[in-house]
Image: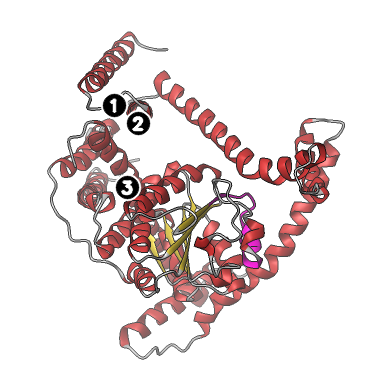
Amino acid sequence: MIKKTDVSITTWILIAFGTVNIAFLATGKLGFNGKGLGIITAVAITLAMYSFLYKDNPVFKIAENIFVGVAMGYSIIIVWFNILKPDVFEALIVPMFKDTGNAPQYLVIVPTLLGLFMFLRFSSKLSWLSRWSFAFIVGMGSGIAIPNFINAILLRQLEPMLAPLYTGSFWGTIDTLLVLIGVVSVLFYFFFSMEHKGVIGGVSVIGIWFLMIAFGASFGYTVMARMSLLIGRIQFLLKDWLGIIQ
Amino acid sequence: MEKLLKIDRRILFVLVALAVTIPLLFRFKMPVPPTRHVKSMYNKIDSLSEDSHVLISFDYDPSSKEELQPMAHALLHHCFKKNIKVIGMTLYPAGTGLAEKAIKEIGKEYGKKSGKDYVFLGFKAGSSLVIMNMGEDIYTAFQEDFYGKKTVGMQALKGVRSLRDIDYAVNLTASGIYEAWIVYGKEKYNFDLGVGCTAVMGPEMYPFIQSSQLTGFMGGLKGAAEYETLVGHKDRASAGMAPQSVVHVLVVCFILFGNFIYFASGRKK
């Protein structure tokens, strides 16, 4: 239920926003062109998204839905001009009906059909055809991924674990030792075939400490990331829109 | 005590907004000493000769623009300043506009021309398959650049046949796609790789640094600010360090305050 006060707050904010932008356009601070109107649109969407911090509201919902629609539309256009047009339309379909000097690339039919089969998930009668596409993706994906991941992630990550502890410097050795203790103790913590008692229990407690420190570092980085997004938006509002910082 | 545990969260939002806005308005300088991992990326590019090729994969979309676009700008400034040929591409459809804008704008500042000094290959679907395709033959993976020009014979790609001929590759990413660059790119075709990632992903990079699979990495806005400092072109990331520091202090205060009140009130749920 929308309260009367919320409606009046929204109305006053919209009036203030409109007045500021009309003043900017009238004084030439923002150009009446694609760039100026683009900035105004971006500001409106930014403020609408942040209005959620006050409470969920229709303005936020409108902005959210606009974002979803625009993102989808943009992706479709990019996929058409970067993939479907050059790789399917111009490579296969156009040469079939028009003399372009290039022979139609009939091999393109195979991946195109497999791609189209994916859409048959929507048909109860023909959805079985989409399994061919999924079988191809899963089979090829696994074939490519498994050996490469074993080599690049598992084996290459094990290499530093097998390096000598003494690295030539005191602090370097401490680092290597910490990594070794961390890996072993965390592996013990995730070893569930034996009860965590005695030595195993003690080592897994060390593992928990390592995990907690890792989570803490991760959370710190997450705070930094989220604040960076806010800083970027406020920089945009103060610099590109209001022009009060350089 | 009870009241303090139930502060309206909107008050905290206002405090955070003020902690970001005030340092931006009353700018004060914060030292941004470059860390080892950012320095090693910088040193790698700095050691390249003119006409070397640096590939930048802009694998992010507008949701992580604030962290990764300043990195892209700093890298491009460095490359163009040193007359290094830049090969731009993206594996994210929504990243195309941001990538093109960055290359075009920074290239213009240095008088660089598309096709001659840099090439923007645009978006290609398939992530790992695109990387492997480029590892075999860059011209079959991208027959045309973003503007529809044939890549074969393009001056910006002179001497480049596949990923093996790239002097340095940088993946600017907001997702796990960097793993694909390591697994299907670096490990298979043996080229040096650096990563610029969002701060959230920062801790994930250390194991790859330790195993020398990455030459370095930039993490979040801080990483971008460090690179800006090294290039000597301070921009949005460096300007963002003052509010970042203030807001971090504020968050630490929130955590200490919350814990103090929680324990002082007898740890009631």
Assess whether mark 1 and mark 2 are in contact (beta carbons under 8 angstroms). yes
Which three-letter amino acid code belongs to the residue tagged 2? Answer: Lys
Q: Work out whether B143 lies above or below B183.
A: above
- Residue drawn 36% across the image and 69% down it: B37
Local SS, label 1: loop
Q: Name the residue under label 3.
A: A228
Cα–Cα span, label 3 and label 2: 24 Å
Q: Name the residue under label 1.
A: A31
Local SS, label 2: helix
Which three-letter amino acid code belongs to the residue tagged 1? Answer: Gly
Q: Name the residue under label 2.
A: A35
Q: Tell me which corner region of the image, top left, top right, bottom left or bottom right, holds residue A1.
A: top left
**Location of residue B207 in the rendering, given as x and y in whole percent from the top left corner:** 47, 70
- The chain letter under disc 3 is A
Q: What stretch is highlighted in magenta?
A: B121-136
Left or right of A109, for residue B43: left
Front position in the image: B225 or B1:
B225
Residue A241 - label:
none
- Dot 1 or dot 3: first in sequence order is 1
